[in-house]
Image (cartoon, rainbow, N blue to C red):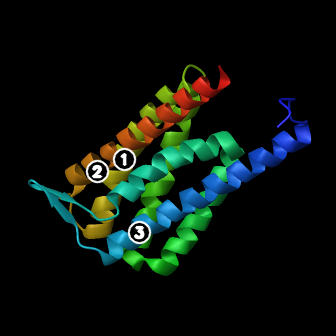
């Protein structure tokens, strides 16, 4: 490394690769959430029912925000379509339909909240949009997928844990970047 700034072409190339990596992670998380919800039994945490795909679904909320940063709204929409299509082929029809409906609504709300808060704080935008996304997604997905609201509190808990973990990872990455740039 020479320490010289990269050219615009090199910077754009890196942005494309990061966008592709985040897209793949997002789509993979959507697929894993739906596959796990179809093939694995729910977890019991105390008296809460936590559907098996909950943590994966929670991770998608933060990945959606990162995807928004890397590729914009059109990249997010493309990733949602690809994730929905792949989920349809790997999950039960009921899980796939519930996922598409819940993700469509929650991702739109998530995107609006993220955009409004982002001008003040990227990390704050991730937290705020995740909270709105995880509640709206859970309230829609659980009854459509499982025919009952019984697992909504457990799903909200699981997605909250995923949000805390992903925000902690973003914060750690931000601190590491600052330490390296000093």
| Residue farthest toward the front in the current orientation of the protein | 1
**Residue of label 1:** 162
Q: Position of residue 134 (x, y in %)?
A: 37, 46
Q: Are marks 1 and 2 in contact (CB under 8 Å)?
A: yes
Q: CA distance from mark 1 to mark 2?
A: 6 Å
**Residue of label 2:** 158
Residue 83, compared with residue 158, is above or below; it is below
Q: Nearer the viewer, residue 160 or 111?
A: 160
User: Who's the residue at 54% across and 35% down the image?
Assistant: 173
Q: Position of residue 35 (x, y in %)?
A: 41, 73
Q: Is residue 155 visible?
A: yes
Disc 2 secondary structure class: helix
Q: Position of residue 141 (x, y in %)?
A: 35, 59
Q: Nearer the viewer, residue 43 or 155?
A: 43
Disc 3 secondary structure class: helix
Disc 1 secondary structure class: helix
How many numbered marks are there? 3
Structural crowding at the residue carrying mark 1, measured as other residues with C-alpha within 10 Å and reported as few (<14), some (14–19) or many (≥20):
many
Q: Quadrant of the N terminus?
A: top right
Q: Earlier in the sequence, mark 3 or mark 1?
A: 3
Q: For the residues carrying marks 3 and 1, which lies nearer the camera in this image?
A: 1
Q: Position of residue 174 (x, y in %)?
A: 55, 30
Structural crowding at the residue carrying mark 3, measured as other residues with C-alpha within 10 Å and reported as few (<14), some (14–19) or many (≥20):
many
Q: Quadrant of residue 44?
A: bottom left
Q: Quadrant of residue 20?
A: bottom right
**Residue of label 3:** 34
Q: Quadrant of the C terminus?
A: top right
Q: CA distance from mark 3 to mark 2?
A: 15 Å
User: Who's the residue at 86% across and 30% down the image?
Assistant: 5
Is 162 positioned to the left or the right of 116 in the image?
A: left
User: Who's the residue at 24% across and 68% down the image?
Assistant: 147
């Amino acid at each position: 490394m020479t320490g010289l700034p990269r050219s615009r072409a090199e910077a754009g190339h890196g942005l494309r690769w990061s966008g592709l990596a985040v897209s793949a992670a997002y789509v993979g998380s959507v697929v894993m959430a739906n596959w796990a919800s179809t093939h694995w039994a729910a977890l019991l945490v105390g008296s809460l029912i936590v559907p098996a795909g909950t943590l994966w679904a929670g991770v998608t909320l933060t990945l959606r925000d990162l995807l928004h940063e890397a590729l914009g709204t059109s990249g997010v929409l493309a990733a949602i379509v690809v994730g929905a299509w792949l989920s349809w082929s790997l999950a039960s029809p009921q899980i796939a339909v519930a996922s598409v409906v819940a993700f469509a609504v929650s991702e739109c709300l998530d995107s609006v909240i993220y955009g409004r808060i982002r001008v003040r704080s990227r990390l704050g935008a991730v937290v705020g949009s995740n909270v709105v996304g995880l509640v709206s997604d859970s309230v829609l997905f659980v009854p459509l997928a499982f025919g009952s609201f019984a697992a909504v509190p457990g799903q909200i808990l699981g997605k909250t844990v995923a949000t805390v973990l992903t925000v902690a990872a973003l914060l750690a990455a931000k601190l590491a970047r600052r330490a390296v740039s000093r």
